[in-house]
Image: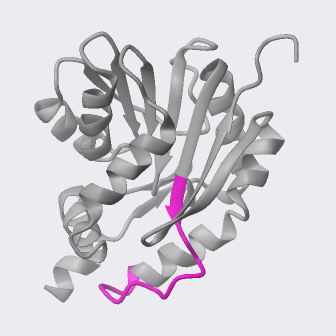
Amino acid sequence: MHETLRRMHSRPHGTGTTLDAFRLNALVTYVAFAGRRGRVYRRIIALSGTRPGDQVLDVGCSSGYLVRMLAVAAGPSGSVTGLDPAAAAIAYARRRGPANAAFRTGVAQDLSAFPDASFDVVTSTLAIHHVPARKREAAFREMLRVTRPGGRLLVADFDPSRRALPLHRGAARMQQAAASTGPLDELAARAGYQAGGQGTLPLLRYVTAVRPPEGT
């Protein structure tokens, strides 16, 4: 088991880190939430404000767990796009995605595949700490660019003030990386979002924000 967990660690590359053993990572995350992952993610969806008919982008979607839940909230008249740098995770997500979900490979700091103001809601959960520190502000600027005026952002990541997860030795490194992102609300504000709210959930901290309407 310990050898398997060692193989699960994210693989660094020039644009960030890619989780190779994404299914095992999902299992470890499930255990870390002590069976509360579904409840926590439903709260994330509520905080995002996703409504029927919304066009949603989930940045760092991994195997598509949150995308599938967001697709229910967006309903058949809406759609959800999941983005992740791991091609294997995207292939897995595509096989399990509902009709109103799409998936593509890509990184948070380069959303050039999407036109300006494409989405009503942009979410990112447990992904920002994988983005290289020097590119995190660019990631937030890109998320702003693809958010429609009046559209909403929700970003959640590990809460560095919580006790390190005792599941494998990579957990402490993930929390250290999450701590290095700094306050999420400041990253959102520097990108041009207006503050919404911030708070904590089990294991997580989050920020919500809004892209200002045109002319404000």
Residue in the foreground of this view, choosing between 153 and 39 = 39
Q: In which quadrant of the rendered view does residue 128 lie?
A: bottom right
- Whether residue 81 sits left or right of residue 27 in the image: it is right
Residue in the foreground of this view, choosing between 135 and 13 = 135
Which residue sits at x=77%, y=24%? 212
Residue 188: image location, x then y, percent: 73, 44
**Residue 135 visible in the picture:** no
Q: If the image is split into quadrants, where does the N terminus sit?
A: bottom left
Q: In which quadrant of the rendered view does residue 111 lie?
A: top right
- The vertical placement of 210 against 131, above or below, is above
In magenta segment, residue 114: no
Residue 56: image location, x then y, percent: 44, 25
Give the colouring mode of the picture: one colour
Give the residues in magenta.
156-170
- Whether residue 148 sits left or right of residue 33 in the image: it is right
Residue 11: image location, x then y, percent: 40, 62
Residue in the foreground of this view, choosing between 80 and 2 = 80
Residue in the foreground of this view, choosing between 176 and 3 = 176
| Magenta-colored segment: predominant secondary structure | loop
- The vertical placement of 131 against 114, above or below, is below
Which residue sits at x=25%, y=29%? 72
Which residue sits at x=68%, y=70%? 180
